[in-house]
Amino acid sequence: MKKFVIGLCAALGLASAVFAQGTPAPDGARVYFVNLEDGATVSSPVTVVFGLENMGVAPAGTERENTGHHHLLLNRPPLGDGPDGAEELEYGLPADENHIHFGGGQTQVTLDLDPGQHTMQLVMGDLNHVPHATPITSDVITITVE
């Protein structure tokens, strides 16, 4: 019985380690802003168009190789930085005003943003909103809303 328990614990530990590695990212996958660039000055409402290369978009919950769905990080540190950086890489992104999910497979959004500077970063998530094993992220851009 002791060997069974030790074996079970080892198997569960291995399964957890495999799960924690996340969904593999397709080679050459890239996410980017189509219509905005760093330093742009815009007026509100702001339409943000998401670009994606070398992978497909699928709604959250869809298990399909080489796909994911978009998340927009708004006015927060880059993915993996900040107090919850390790958790969001392993367990997924929260859904709040700084983490906007596009689990329906959307590829753009129009936002009402207050005047001032705003930072944005696009992040691809797998079927469970977890960034891929090698995260697919855009550069962080800063825009100014007049």
Image (cartoon, rainbow, N blue to C red):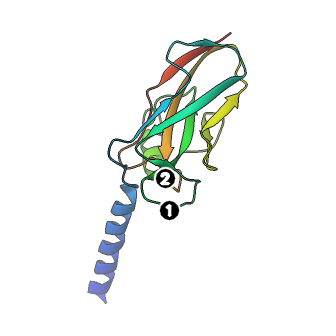
Measured from the top left, where is residue 123 in percent x and y? 49, 39
Mark 2 neighbour density, 10 Å: few (under 14) some (14–19) many (20 or more): many
Q: List x then y, in percent, for residue 138.
A: 45, 31
Which residue corresponds to the image point at 48% horizontal and 43% vertical from the top-left? 124
Q: Nearer the viewer, mark 2 or mark 1?
A: 1
Q: Earlier in the sequence, mark 2 or mark 1?
A: 1
Residue depicted at x 47% and y 25%: 140
Q: Secondary structure at mark 1?
A: loop
Which residue is found at the position 40% from the left and 55% from the top?
23
Find residue 133 and report its horizontal and vertical position in percent: 37, 49
**Circle 2: element type:** loop
Which mark, residue 63? 1
Tag 2–tag 1 contact (CB < 8 Å): no
**Amino acid type of the residue tagged 2 in the rendering:** Asp
Q: Nearer the viewer, residue 28 or 86?
A: 28
User: Eyeballing the image, is 70 above or below 81?
Assistant: below
> Circle 1: is it few (<14), some (14-19), or many (20+) Cα within 10 Å?
few
Mark on residue 126? 2
Q: Is residue 14 above or below residue 70?
A: below
Quadrant housing the C terminus: top right
